[in-house]
Amino acid sequence: MKIKFLTTAIFLIILTGCDKPSKLTESSSPTITAQFEQSDEKIGKYLDQLDDPNTPIEVRKKILCKDYPAEYKENYMPALLKLSPTEYSEAKLLKELKIALDYYKNSYEIKCSN
Protein backbone atom coordinates (compact mmCIF):
# COMPACT_ATOMS: atom_id res chain seq x y z
CA MET A 1 0.00 0.00 0.00
CA LYS A 2 2.83 2.40 0.87
CA ILE A 3 4.56 1.68 -2.43
CA LYS A 4 1.40 2.45 -4.41
CA PHE A 5 0.94 5.73 -2.53
CA LEU A 6 4.59 6.70 -2.93
CA THR A 7 4.59 5.87 -6.64
CA THR A 8 1.42 7.87 -7.22
CA ALA A 9 2.73 10.82 -5.21
CA ILE A 10 6.03 10.86 -7.10
CA PHE A 11 4.39 10.79 -10.51
CA LEU A 12 2.06 13.60 -9.51
CA ILE A 13 5.05 15.65 -8.36
CA ILE A 14 6.90 14.92 -11.59
CA LEU A 15 3.89 15.93 -13.65
CA THR A 16 3.50 19.10 -11.61
CA GLY A 17 7.19 19.90 -11.94
CA CYS A 18 7.13 19.33 -15.69
CA ASP A 19 3.87 21.15 -16.28
CA LYS A 20 4.12 24.37 -18.19
CA PRO A 21 3.48 27.44 -16.08
CA SER A 22 -0.11 28.55 -16.24
CA LYS A 23 0.54 32.26 -15.74
CA LEU A 24 3.36 34.06 -17.38
CA THR A 25 4.71 37.18 -15.75
CA GLU A 26 4.77 40.46 -17.59
CA SER A 27 8.56 40.32 -17.70
CA SER A 28 8.64 36.96 -19.48
CA SER A 29 10.26 37.08 -22.85
CA PRO A 30 10.01 34.78 -25.84
CA THR A 31 13.61 33.72 -25.16
CA ILE A 32 12.81 32.54 -21.64
CA THR A 33 9.64 30.82 -22.82
CA ALA A 34 11.58 29.05 -25.58
CA GLN A 35 14.29 28.02 -23.09
CA PHE A 36 11.64 26.59 -20.80
CA GLU A 37 9.87 24.70 -23.59
CA GLN A 38 13.12 23.22 -24.92
CA SER A 39 14.21 22.18 -21.45
CA ASP A 40 10.78 20.74 -20.65
CA GLU A 41 10.97 18.66 -23.82
CA LYS A 42 14.45 17.35 -22.92
CA ILE A 43 13.33 16.43 -19.41
CA GLY A 44 10.30 14.67 -20.85
CA LYS A 45 12.60 12.61 -23.08
CA TYR A 46 14.80 11.73 -20.10
CA LEU A 47 11.75 10.56 -18.14
CA ASP A 48 10.55 8.52 -21.12
CA GLN A 49 13.96 6.83 -21.31
CA LEU A 50 13.96 6.14 -17.58
CA ASP A 51 10.51 4.55 -17.80
CA ASP A 52 11.39 2.45 -20.86
CA PRO A 53 12.20 -1.10 -19.70
CA ASN A 54 14.64 -1.49 -22.62
CA THR A 55 16.89 1.38 -21.52
CA PRO A 56 20.30 0.02 -20.44
CA ILE A 57 21.37 0.66 -16.85
CA GLU A 58 24.41 2.66 -18.04
CA VAL A 59 22.12 5.09 -19.89
CA ARG A 60 19.82 5.37 -16.85
CA LYS A 61 22.81 6.12 -14.64
CA LYS A 62 24.06 8.83 -17.01
CA ILE A 63 20.59 10.41 -17.12
CA LEU A 64 20.08 10.27 -13.34
CA CYS A 65 23.57 11.26 -12.26
CA LYS A 66 24.45 13.83 -14.91
CA ASP A 67 22.04 14.80 -17.70
CA TYR A 68 18.70 15.21 -15.93
CA PRO A 69 19.98 17.14 -12.87
CA ALA A 70 22.14 19.39 -15.07
CA GLU A 71 19.31 20.21 -17.47
CA TYR A 72 16.89 20.79 -14.61
CA LYS A 73 19.21 23.08 -12.63
CA GLU A 74 20.81 24.97 -15.52
CA ASN A 75 17.84 25.53 -17.83
CA TYR A 76 14.46 24.30 -16.62
CA MET A 77 14.50 25.72 -13.09
CA PRO A 78 15.86 29.20 -13.95
CA ALA A 79 13.36 29.61 -16.79
CA LEU A 80 10.44 28.40 -14.68
CA LEU A 81 11.41 30.74 -11.84
CA LYS A 82 11.47 33.67 -14.27
CA LEU A 83 8.16 32.70 -15.86
CA SER A 84 6.28 31.97 -12.63
CA PRO A 85 8.13 33.46 -9.66
CA THR A 86 5.08 33.54 -7.39
CA GLU A 87 4.14 29.89 -8.02
CA TYR A 88 7.58 28.32 -7.59
CA SER A 89 10.63 28.75 -5.42
CA GLU A 90 14.12 27.39 -5.86
CA ALA A 91 13.77 25.31 -2.70
CA LYS A 92 10.49 23.78 -3.86
CA LEU A 93 11.87 22.90 -7.30
CA LEU A 94 15.05 21.39 -5.85
CA LYS A 95 12.95 19.31 -3.47
CA GLU A 96 10.85 18.02 -6.40
CA LEU A 97 14.03 17.19 -8.31
CA LYS A 98 15.41 15.26 -5.35
CA ILE A 99 12.18 13.29 -4.93
CA ALA A 100 12.12 12.34 -8.61
CA LEU A 101 15.81 11.40 -8.70
CA ASP A 102 15.56 9.39 -5.48
CA TYR A 103 12.56 7.50 -6.83
CA TYR A 104 14.35 6.44 -10.01
CA LYS A 105 17.65 5.73 -8.24
CA ASN A 106 15.88 3.49 -5.74
CA SER A 107 13.81 1.81 -8.46
CA TYR A 108 16.87 0.88 -10.49
CA GLU A 109 19.34 0.61 -7.59
CA ILE A 110 21.58 3.32 -9.04
CA LYS A 111 24.22 5.06 -6.97
CA CYS A 112 25.85 8.21 -8.26
CA SER A 113 29.48 8.81 -7.35
CA ASN A 114 29.41 12.39 -6.01
Image (spheres, rainbow, N blue to C red):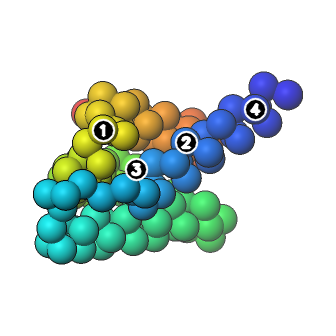
Q: Amino acid at mark 4?
A: Phe
Q: Is residue 18 left or right of residue 28?
A: right
Secondary structure under badge 1? loop
Q: Amino acid at mark 3?
A: Leu
Residues at marks 2 and 1 touching, judged by CB atoms closer than 8 Å: no
Image spot of residue 39 (x, y percent) = 30, 66
Q: Is residue 73 above or below residue 5?
A: below
**Image quarter hosting the N terminus:** top right
Q: Mark 2 or mark 1: which comes first in sequence?
A: 2
Mark in front: 4 vs 2: 2
Residue marked by disc 2? 13
3D distance between C-alphas at marks 2 and 3: 17 Å
Is residue 48 something one can see in this rendering? yes
Residue marked by disc 1? 86
Secondary structure under badge 2? helix
Q: Mark 1 or mark 4: which comes first in sequence?
A: 4
Residue marked by disc 3? 64
Residues at marks 1 and 3 touching, judged by CB atoms closer than 8 Å: no
Q: Is residue 84 above or below residue 46?
A: above
Residue 9, by quadrant, is top right
Residue marked by disc 4? 5
Image spot of residue 106 (x, y percent) = 57, 36
Q: Amino acid at mark 2?
A: Ile
Q: Is residue 107 above or below residue 15?
A: above
Image spot of residue 77 (x, y percent) = 27, 49
Residue 104, by quadrant, is top right
